[in-house]
Image (spheres, coloured by chain):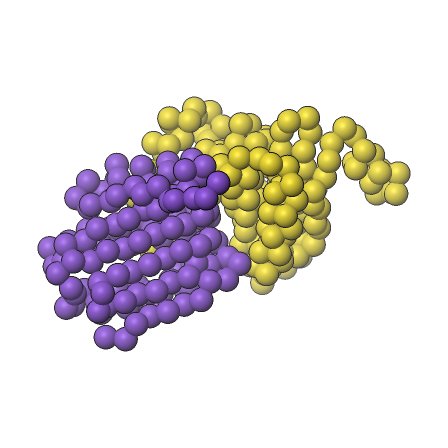
Chain colours: A yellow, B purple
């Protein structure tokens, strides 16, 4: 159970949280949150490359949650809500997200993320270009490019699936930049 | 042919397509909710334009950052321009801020992917 105390520990544990959001994701919310991040990060005097990487990773993660919910909006007992937070610990920034997915999607996502996290920067670049080249017209959903896009921009990518019930898992993804 | 002009928003770029000058410009951030829908008017304009284009056509792209579906869309756009290259002398100017390595890298990727297209990497002049 979340209590005020546990929230406090999230905010105090040697890290700074710039942004947290839990609920249903919409495009205008994502754009608004990206704007907030731009303001927060501006004050940190980061290089333009690093700040843009943080924004892109945040956008990919948040739009993933939004698109996943849209795709399943008519399914029974589906909870469209997600969670994101962006923060800083020591000299690294992190962008984390969580949403609820089905078991079959877990299988797909897990396989892809295992591939993504096994590749080095050159390998990622190669796969990214291969996937982008294939499937003309599939850019609505990014054609599966999203995780490669994220991985190319981060130092580390962690993921975890926590079982809720037979067909439901929490999918947690955390990127360090 | 009428000019196409779309205002910039928080998550979509400014688009100006000028048939008389043969100048196509896309400038800003790109992470629409539905990339294909957003760029559809531009793609339709481009299709019409290349039925009777200018001798020279320049596409200027200055994209600060973009999501993966925009990346896929730009790829498809360049693929289309490659098909049109017999009809007009096309130059793509990929404009990037020197401090924005990701934008430079994205431009380099496109050069590697489209050997038949004339893609120029152009460093944006900044005051800092």
Q: How many marks?
A: 0
Q: Residue at x 31, y 43 (%)?
A: B122
State which quarter of the image contains the N terminus of chain A: top right
Q: Is residue B104 left or right of residue B46?
A: right
- Up the image or down, A28 lies above or below B1; here it is above
Foreground: B119 or B51?
A: B119
Q: Is residue B105 visible?
A: yes
Q: Is residue A166 visible?
A: no
State the image coordinates of residue A174 (x, y, percent, origin top left): 61, 35
State which quarter of the image contains the C terminus of chain A: top right
State the image coordinates of residue A6 (x, y, percent, origin top left): 84, 37
Residue A127 is drawn in which quadrant? Answer: top left
Q: Is residue A126 left or right of residue A155?
A: left
Foreground: A44 or A125?
A: A44
- Up the image or down, A95 lies above or below B47; here it is above
Q: Residue at x 61, y 43 (%)?
A: A42
Q: Residue at x 48, y 40 (%)?
A: B128
Q: Residue at x 26, y 64 (%)?
A: B46
Residue B102 is drawn in which quadrant? Answer: top left
State the image coordinates of residue A147 (x, y, percent, origin top left): 48, 39
State the image coordinates of residue A170 (x, y, percent, origin top left): 66, 41
Residue with the most extreme bottom position: B2
Foreground: A147 or A29?
A: A29
- Up the image or down, A47 lies above or below B25; here it is above
Q: Is residue A52 left or right of residue B90?
A: right
- Up the image or down, B75 lies above or below A125; here it is below
């Amino acid at each position: 159970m979340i209590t005020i105390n546990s929230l406090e520990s999230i905010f105090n544990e040697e890290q700074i949280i710039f942004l947290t959001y839990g609920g249903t994701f919409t495009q205008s919310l994502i754009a608004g949150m990206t704007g907030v991040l731009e303001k927060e990060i501006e004050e940190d005097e980061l290089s333009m490359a690093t700040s843009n990487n943080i924004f892109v990773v945040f956008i990919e993660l948040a739009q993933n949650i939004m698109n996943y919910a849209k795709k399943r909006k008519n399914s029974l007992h589906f909870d469209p809500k997600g969670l994101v937070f962006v923060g800083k610990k020591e000299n690294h920034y992190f962008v984390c997200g969580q949403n609820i997915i089905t078991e079959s999607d877990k299988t797909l996502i897990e396989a892809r993320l295992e591939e993504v996290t096994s590749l080095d920067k050159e390998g990622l670049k190669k796969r990214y270009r291969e996937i982008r080249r294939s499937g003309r017209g599939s850019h609505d959903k990014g054609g599966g490019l999203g995780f490669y896009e994220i991985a190319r921009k981060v130092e580390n990518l962690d993921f975890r699936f926590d079982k809720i019930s037979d067909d439901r898992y929490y999918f947690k993804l955390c990127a360090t930049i | 042919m009428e000019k196409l002009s779309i205002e910039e928003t928080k998550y979509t770029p400014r688009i100006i397509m000028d048939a008389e000058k043969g100048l196509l410009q896309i400038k800003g951030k790109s992470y629409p909710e539905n990339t294909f829908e957003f760029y559809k008017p531009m793609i339709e304009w481009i299709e019409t334009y290349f039925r009777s284009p200018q001798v020279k056509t320049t596409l200027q792209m200055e994209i600060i950052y973009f999501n993966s579906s925009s990346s896929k869309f730009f790829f498809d756009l360049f693929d289309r321009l490659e098909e049109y290259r017999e009809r007009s002398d096309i130059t793509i100017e990929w404009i990037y801020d020197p401090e924005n390595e990701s934008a430079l890298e994205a431009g380099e990727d496109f050069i590697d992917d489209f050997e038949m297209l004339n893609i120029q990497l152009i460093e944006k002049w900044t005051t800092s």
